[in-house]
Image (tube, grey):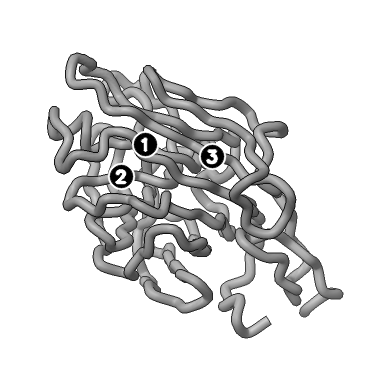
């Protein structure tokens, strides 16, 4: 049985949802550095609120990372929201993003969003991401994590969409977070569904909450131990970041 329409944020726009009774907005951010659980700026990275490059409203979040050949740590410039999903939830998660106009596309990973939790108490991992969204070259990739923290399996979905530098793009994910093969995982890019997987384990067998982070994590620099290409300073902008939980399984385009 459906209830009245509920306006809930799923990323780059507000969509009129006709949902079942159990539905809730987790958070909505319109391109500001306020309202986050924390902000992660590693090494020479930065996260700032700007007004000169925006999506719809007056502000956006600009994230930058700078390669340092003498540095061996990681390269996170991210905003962080705690307690966004746990196993058993179903929800939508979305954001708008823009690469700098002269972005140099390389076949090296640049992560732009991730769900992550602290598993340091298990002795098998520390902060471990489940799903991630990243660029390799000009292609969009995502993944899910299955199994247990001590016996993980990663399932990757690649070449989902072509990303253009200097243009705003919109990503929306819908997921049923399950570890027993009953989950689903979908992704829309600029309003077009580019991924739909059912009967899938979408998270590890653990009930702790995961964070949702967006920003630039230049994980390829760390994982490869070097930088491909010659662009050692990279910037992205983010806006209209949001999440909502519901028991509904339907496409935003149908609402």
Q: Which mark is residue 66?
A: none
Q: Marks 1/3: CA distance?
A: 13 Å
Specify the quadrant of the image occupied by residue 95. bottom right
Q: Is residue 246 rendered to the left or right of residue 66?
A: right
Residue 205 pos. (x, y %): 38, 43
Q: Residue furthest bottom?
A: 254
Is residue 225 or residue 253 the one in the foreground?
Answer: 225
Which residue has dot 3 on it? 62
Closer to the N terminus: mark 2 or mark 1?
2
Q: Nearer the viewer, mark 1 or mark 3?
A: 3
| Residue contact at pointers 1 and 3, CB within 8 angstroms | no
The answer to whether any part of residue 168 appears in the image is yes
Q: Is residue 49 above or below residue 195?
A: above
| Residue contact at pointers 2 and 1, CB within 8 angstroms | yes
Q: Is residue 246 above or below residue 216?
A: below
Which residue has dot 2 on it? 110
Which residue has dot 1 on it? 217
Q: Residues within 10 Å of mark 3 (few under 14, many from 20)?
A: many
Residue drawn at point x = 27 percent, y = 33 percent = 232
Q: Secondary structure at mark 2?
A: strand
Is residue 61 or residue 72 the one in the foreground?
Answer: 61
Q: Residues within 10 Å of mark 2 (few under 14, many from 20)?
A: many
Q: Residues within 10 Å of mark 1 (few under 14, many from 20)?
A: many
């Amino acid at each position: 049985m459906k209830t009245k329409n509920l306006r809930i944020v799923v990323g780059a726009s507000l969509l009129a949802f006709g949902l079942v009774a159990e539905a809730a907005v987790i958070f909505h951010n319109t391109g500001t550095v306020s309202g986050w659980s924390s902000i992660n700026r590693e090494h020479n990275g930065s996260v700032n609120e700007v007004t000169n490059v925006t999506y719809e409203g007056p502000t956006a979040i600009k994230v930058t990372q700078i390669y340092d050949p003498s540095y061996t740590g990681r390269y996170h410039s991210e905003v962080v929201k705690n307690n966004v999903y746990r196993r058993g939830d179903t929800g939508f998660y979305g954001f708008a993003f823009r690469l700098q106009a002269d972005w140099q596309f390389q076949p090296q990973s640049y992560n732009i969003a991730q769900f992550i939790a602290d598993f340091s108490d298990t002795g098998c991992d520390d902060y471990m991401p489940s799903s991630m969204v990243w660029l390799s070259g000009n292609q969009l990739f995502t993944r899910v994590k299955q199994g247990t923290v001590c016996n993980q399996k990663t399932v990757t979905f690649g070449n989902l969409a072509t990303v253009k530098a200097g243009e705003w793009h919109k990503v929306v994910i819908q997921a049923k977070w399950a570890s027993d093969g009953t989950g689903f995982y979908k992704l829309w890019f600029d309003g077009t569904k580019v991924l739909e997987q059912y009967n899938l384990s979408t998270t590890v067998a653990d009930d702790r909450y995961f964070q949702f982070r967006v920003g630039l994590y230049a994980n390829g620099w760390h994982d490869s131990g070097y930088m491909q290409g010659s662009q050692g300073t990279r910037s992205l902008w983010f806006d209209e970041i949001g999440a909502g939980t519901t028991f509904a399984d339907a496409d935003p385009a149908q609402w």
